[in-house]
């Protein structure tokens, strides 16, 4: 039986054929026994206009982000990005009994 957690979504399915607008960037950290550990990558927080500006966190394994939070905040224009090899999966939060999406990319490219 195929479960929602077995399904992998591609970029077109995630973005509905639209663009990604970068809103913030942060370190991605590992969690060990509920505590933050070492930095293991970068989290890019984006919104998807074709999905009603739904927010999505995309993680990469890169330790250095392609853009800083300061650069994002100083920009007068929306920052359009491409998540290279974007893929997403469903995961279930058993406490809330709901499914959520986790997304990963190889790297992030600034388009505009």
Image (spheres, rainbow, N blue to C red):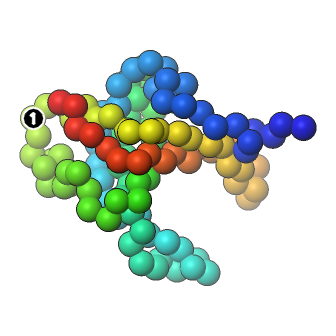
Residue in the foreground of this view, choosing between 85 and 18: 85
Q: Residues within 10 Å of mark 1 (few under 14, many from 20)?
A: few
Total labels: the figure holds: 1
Horizontal side of 5 relative to 64 (left or right) equals right
Write the residue at 30% across / 53% down.
Answer: 25
Residue in the foreground of this view, choosing between 33 and 39: 39
Write the residue at 38% across / 34% down.
Answer: 47
Could you say where residue 46 lies in the image, as x and y percent from the top left?
Answer: 36, 40
Could you say where residue 11 lies in the image, as x and y percent from the top left?
Answer: 48, 30
- Compared to residue 106, the image places residue 82 above or below, namely above
- Compared to residue 93, the image places residue 99 above or below, namely above
Could you say where residue 101 lies in the image, as x and y percent from the top left?
Answer: 59, 43
Write the residue at 73% across / 44% down.
Answer: 5
Residue lying furthest right = 1
- SS at mark 1? loop
Any part of residue 30 in sight: yes
- Compared to residue 3, the image places residue 13 above or below, namely above
Q: Quadrant of the N terminus?
A: top right
Residue in the foreground of this view, choosing between 110 and 27: 110
Where residue 88 sits, quadrant-wise, is: top right
Where residue 20 sits, quadrant-wise, is: top left
Kindly identify which residue carries mark 1. Answer: 76
Write the residue at 9% across / 35% down.
Answer: 76
Any part of residue 96 in sight: no
Could you say where residue 109 lies in the image, as x and y percent from the top left?
Answer: 27, 40
Q: Quadrant of the C terminus?
A: top left
Horizontal side of 108 relative to 75 (left or right) equals right
Horizontal side of 52 relative to 32 (left or right) equals left
């Amino acid at each position: 039986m195929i479960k929602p957690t077995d399904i992998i979504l591609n970029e077109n399915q995630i973005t509905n054929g639209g663009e990604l607008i970068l809103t913030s960037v942060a370190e991605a950290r590992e969690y060990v026994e509920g505590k933050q550990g070492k930095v293991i990558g970068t989290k890019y927080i984006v919104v998807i206009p074709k999905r009603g500006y739904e927010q999505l966190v995309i993680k990469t394994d890169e330790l250095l982000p392609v853009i800083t939070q300061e650069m994002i905040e100083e920009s007068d224009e929306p920052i359009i990005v491409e998540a290279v090899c974007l893929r997403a999966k469903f995961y279930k939060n058993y406490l809330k009994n709901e499914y959520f999406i986790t997304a990963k990319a190889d790297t992030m490219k600034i388009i505009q």
